Structures are given as C-alpha cells and as structure tokens.
Amino acid sequence: MGEHILLKNKKAYFNYEILETWEAGIVLTGPEIKSIRKKEVSIDKSFILIRKKQVEILNMNIKNYEFSHNIFLNPTRNRILLLNKKEIEKILKRVKLENLTIVPLKLYLKNNFAKLEIGLGKGKKLIDKRETIKKRDIERKLKKVYK
C-alpha cells in the first residue's frame, strides 16, 4: 500500500525555502484519526516546536468527529510528533545554528497511519516571493501555449 495525500501546506513552499524534510508520525486519539480520514483537518496555521526533546505540532485543527458523542477534545490541542532521537537532535541543532523554522508540509496516510511531512525552512524575503510568483505565472503561460 502506498501513501494517500490528504492535504498540502502550499503557503509553506511560498513563505519558506525548504532545505530538508522528514516523515513524522502523529500521536492521535481514535476520533481524531477518523476526522483526518474524512479530511476534516487543517495545517495551514499550524507550526512546530521542540520542547524538552519532544517535537510538537501546535494549532493543527482537527474537527471533532461527529459520531463520538462522549469524547470532546480541543480541536487545536498540541499533538506530539514521533521522530527518533537522532532526527530530533539534528533538527534542533540546525534550527539553533542556522536560525531555521520547522514547518508542516503535508499530511498523508501511509499504511493506515497518519503521517506528517515536516521540513526545515528558511524564511523567504519579499523579493524571493515575487520571484516565486513570476516563475509560477511563466509556467502557467507555457502550459496554456503547449495545450
């Protein structure tokens, strides 16, 4: 079985130059995974922190599952991301040395487990963002011409 991409964080690629990526598992409850499978989730405004050698995603919005009447969780609660110690140390070291940001890139299902692709990003300046817009416009025009 392959992976099934649920959503991508398009703003991450626009606001950051992604230098390296990792796959992380997410610690979830039963109703949360059901909501994720129904694509009732958002990672647009979420961000990732490392606290006490533990990686957490904050502000990831998972809508409460409609059929779980007895379990009500905060939709934007902090969730732990699963990475091994070496990966966490490598990420932490690069974040501190190079002043980088850890950003969620995409959420997908892999063998029925929810996975989050995270990346180390270097913030783009306004000029770089304009360049990205120009490249995108040129690619769109070329596609139209070749159709």
Image (cartoon, helix red, strand yellow):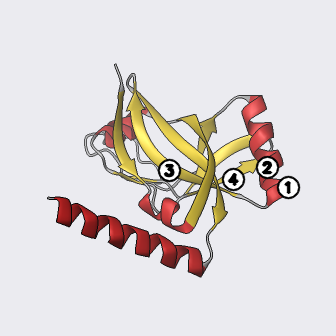
Q: Where in the figure is residue 122, as x and y percent of width and height?
A: 67, 62
Of residues 135 and 12, the one nearer the viewer is 135
Mark 4 residue crowding within 10 angstroms, few (<14) / some (14–19) / many (20+): some
Marks 1,2: beta carbons within 8 A: yes
Which numbered disc flags the more N-terminal residue, 3 or 1? 1
Residue behind mark 3? 105
What's the amino acid at mark 3? Leu
Q: Which mark is residue 97?
A: 1
Measure how far apart labels 3 and 1 are at the Cα level.
22 Å
Residue behind mark 2? 94
Measure how far apart labels 3 and 4 are at the Cα level.
14 Å
Measure how far apart labels 1 and 4 are at the Cα level.
16 Å
Q: Nearer the viewer, mark 3 or mark 4?
A: 3
Q: Residue furthest front?
A: 146
Marks 3,4: beta carbons within 8 A: no
Which numbered disc flags the more N-terminal residue, 1 or 4? 4
Dot 3 lies on which element?
A: strand
Measure how far apart labels 2 and 4 are at the Cα level.
13 Å
Dot 1 lies on which element?
A: helix
Of residues 83 and 99, the one nearer the viewer is 99
Of residues 34 and 122, the one nearer the viewer is 122
| 5 left or right of 18 in image | left
Q: Where in the figure is residue 125, as x and y percent of width and height?
A: 62, 76
Residue behind mark 4? 49
Marks 3,1: beta carbons within 8 A: no
The image quadrant that residue 61 belongs to is bottom left
The image quadrant that residue 121 belongs to is bottom right
Mark 2 residue crowding within 10 angstroms, few (<14) / some (14–19) / many (20+): few
Whether residue 45 can be seen here: no
> Which residue is drawn at the image coordinates 73% and 59% (left, top)?
100
> Which residue is drawn at the image coordinates 80% and 58% (left, top)?
98
What's the amino acid at mark 1? Leu
